Structure formats: C-alpha cells, structure tokens
Image (cartoon, grey):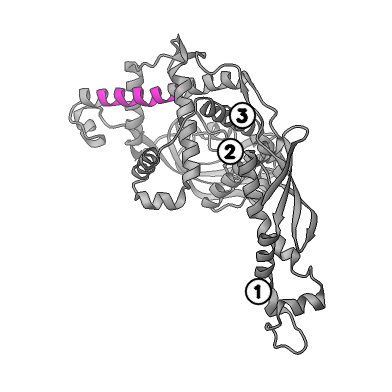
Amino acid sequence: MQLIKSEKKDGNVTELEILVERDAFEAACEKAYHKNVRSISVQGFRKGKAPRKIIEKIYGPGIFYEEAINICYPEAYNKAMEQSGIEPVDQPEINITNVSADGFSFKAIVTTKPEVVLSKYKGIEAEKRTVSVSDADIDDEIQHTAQRNARIVRVDRPIGEGDTVVFDFEGFVDGAPFEGGKAERYSLKIGSGQFIPGFESQLIGAASEQELDVNVTFPDDYHVPELAGKPAVFKCKIHEVSESVLPEIDDEFVKDVSEFDTMAQYRESIKTRLLESRGKHVESEFEDSILEKVIEGMTADIPPVMIEHQLDRYVDDYAYRLSMQGMTMEAYLKMNEMNIESFRQLFREQAERQVKSKLALEAIAKLENFTVTEQDLEAEYKRIADQYKTEVEKIKTTLQADALVADIRLGRAIDLIKEHAVPLEKKTEAPQAKGGDQPSEGGAGT
C-alpha cells in the first residue's frame, strides 16, 4: 500500500489517495478466483475446476477485480489511516480511480475528528455545595422506613386521605364505556395520584359497600387522544377500606429493619449513608460544572455526523431497555404519539454535550501525554470484574483493550481538572438525587 496523497478539504474532511500495488492485488485476485470458481461453468471442465487463466480469457481479465478490490481495500484503507494519523468519525466515501493487473488506486473521502483548542482547563472556578445531614433528615428517613413496614388493617369507617381502598369501577364517556376504563377489586391508595386529577378526592367519605359516581374530566394532554379533554363518569362500588398502622419506632423496630440494636446506632448509620450519597452527588455536580466551563472555552468545528452517531447510541440503548420490559420501540413511539425523529430530538442537547465533553477530555489527555501501561490496564480489568462480581477473563472478552485504554485516559483527564479546580463554597440545602434524562417509560392507564 502506498499513501499517494493526503489533502485536507473544507471543514473536517480529508481526501486520501491510496495505491494498492501489483503483488497485493494479484494475491487478492487469486483469493477471489478460489472463492468464486465453484460457481463458474466452463465448457470442457468440471464445474469448479476451470483454471483462472481460462476463465479470464473467456470472461475478461477483470472478472475477479471487483471481488479482489473488496478483499484488499479495507486493509489498505486502515494502513493509510495509521500512516496519515487522522481519526475518522464516519464510514469513508470510496471511489476507485484506476484498476489494472498492476494494481488499483482509490480515493477515500474521510470525515475526521475536529481540531480542539482549549482556552483553559486548570484553575477552573465553580460552586461546590457543602454537604450536611440534619436530625430532621434522619427523622424523615426513619419515617419512610416505618411507612414501608406499616401493617395494612381493615377499618369500618369512611375513606380518609392515605387509606387503601379496594373497589370496582367502570368509566363512561358520552354514556358509553371505553377501553381500559373498567376494573374489579382494584386496590388504590388515596393520595397516590394514580388516577386522573379529581378522582381520588371524590372517594373520600365513602364507606364500604357504598356505590357512587365520580365525575372527572380527562386532561387535554391525556395519552389516549380519544379521551383527551372529555368529561367522564366512573361508576364505583367500595368493597374494603384499610389504613396503614405504623410500627412503634424504638429499639425493637431498629432490630427488625436493620443490623443494629439501638436507635443511636441506627441513626448514626443513616447519617453516614446520607453523607456518602449526598457527597457523591455533590462531587458529580461539581464535576459537571467544571467540565461545562472547560467546554465553554473550547473551540472545535464538530462534524454533525458525530452528534448523529451519539444519538444512534442513545436510541439503541433506550430500545434495548424497552425490550427488557417487553416493549418495542415502535410500540413506545406509537403510544406516545411520536416518530423516531421527534424522539431523537429529545436527546439532541444531551448528545451534543456528550460529544463536546469527550472531545475536551481527549484533548486534555493528549496535552498531558497520559500513558496507560499494561499494569494500569490489568488493574482496571480487575476493578470492573470486582464491581460486577465476575472473572477478569470474562470482562476481557466483552470489553476491548483499546476502548478501556481510552476510558482510562478520559478518567485521568477528569481527575486532573478536578484536582486543579477552585471550589467556591456555597452552602445550600442538600441536593436531591438526579432524575433520568430520558423520556418517561410509563404506559397507558386510567
């Protein structure tokens, strides 16, 4: 292979001219002959036994050229990438410019990673929250645990806020029942917000075995278009009313819900856990802030295809998670009245930031000349294996070394900018855990 020319065009496009020489092309033609000879019939020879020269004499010397080009151009292209030092971000556009028995030449139009210029990545200033845990925070955690361990006891009284009700219902719009609007012995906790606004509050005050009508109006943005904005009547019959009875919060409660013996030990463990989880969130928030400032000072002409490829990965990942729940992407889109383009648009801002973040961190790793040794690689394989409680060799079969090396370099770049960052203290209430960026995966319901 010879790299005849490497010429940078407009934007992040490079044109390479590559020559595959006679010997390499002849070897590829021979492979093409052996691959195809069994399907070629030549009079006077058993099928699959005709010599190459006879076939070429009958069908022309170029009969195996196309197959031979397909055999040897990928290796030639990859070697040209190494020699030129460019990093492609998309499949190349290949154009054969000349082909003969002496070899062939082709042009590869390649979209490459952009040049990245960083204005600053050390000494970045960003606010960092101070983490604290109050007695009230601990009390809330204990109360939530008590509620999860509450006993459900049937009561002989009217329904109140927080009660659990077992009842039948059937909904009607314009006097006619509608699909999905009927259930028997449905269990509902009043105040949970499971049903459309106004439904649950109208059950309050009703008693066991009582029948009543609940009048509501479906929201204008309801997920079933035929029902959106329409008034409905639900005919209901109450069967059971139950209330939650919280356990006594004492040392015995602590023994039941934890590995501790006393309330003091239990409270201390909750404080430690909350400090740890909030601390991790604060670190993540701080990391996001300083990385955002690095990106703001970055100059790079990012090819749109890089954003599209990142969107492809998000869509594929989301489709996989839907499949784990027994739903297809097509069904999800139909249920939410979306098409694939509007769905991709939901992730576009996230994809753009992901691409910019990676480019910035790669630039830092290159500027700092980070190297990854075999020992570093083995240590990372072991860390991942320990995390997933599996064998190192199994991780090696699923995670390529090149990808892991890249991840290690990016991690070191993050550590570097955090190490040199200047935190500006701002004591506020402890942040809540972040919710997901992806769209809701909830299905249809009343």
From mark 2 to mark 1, how far is it between C-alphas?
55 Å
- Estimate the x, y position of residue 348 in percent, counting from the top left: 66, 34
Magenta residues: mostly which secondary structure?
helix
- Residue type, label 1: His
Vertical order, 35 against 143 (above or below): below
From mark 3 to mark 2, how far is it between C-alphas?
26 Å
Asked whether residue 144 is drawn in magenta, I would say no
- Estimate the x, y position of residue 47 in percent, counting from the top left: 70, 85
Label 2 sits on residue:
440
Foreground: disc 3 or disc 1? 1
- Residue type, label 2: Ser
Q: Tell me the residue at 32%/27% (across/down).
A: 273
Viewer-closest of 166 and 118: 118
Say what secondary structure mark 3 lies in.
helix
Residue sitting at the far left = 261
Asked whether residue 273 is drawn in magenta, I would say yes
- Say which quarter of the image contains residue 387: top left
- Estimate the x, y position of residue 48 in percent, counting from the top left: 68, 82
Label 1 sits on residue:
34
Q: Visible in this render: residue 175?
A: no
Foreground: disc 2 or disc 1? 1
Vertical order, 36 against 285 (above or below): below
Label 3 sits on residue:
356
Viewer-closest of 43 and 167: 43
Region in magenta: 268-282
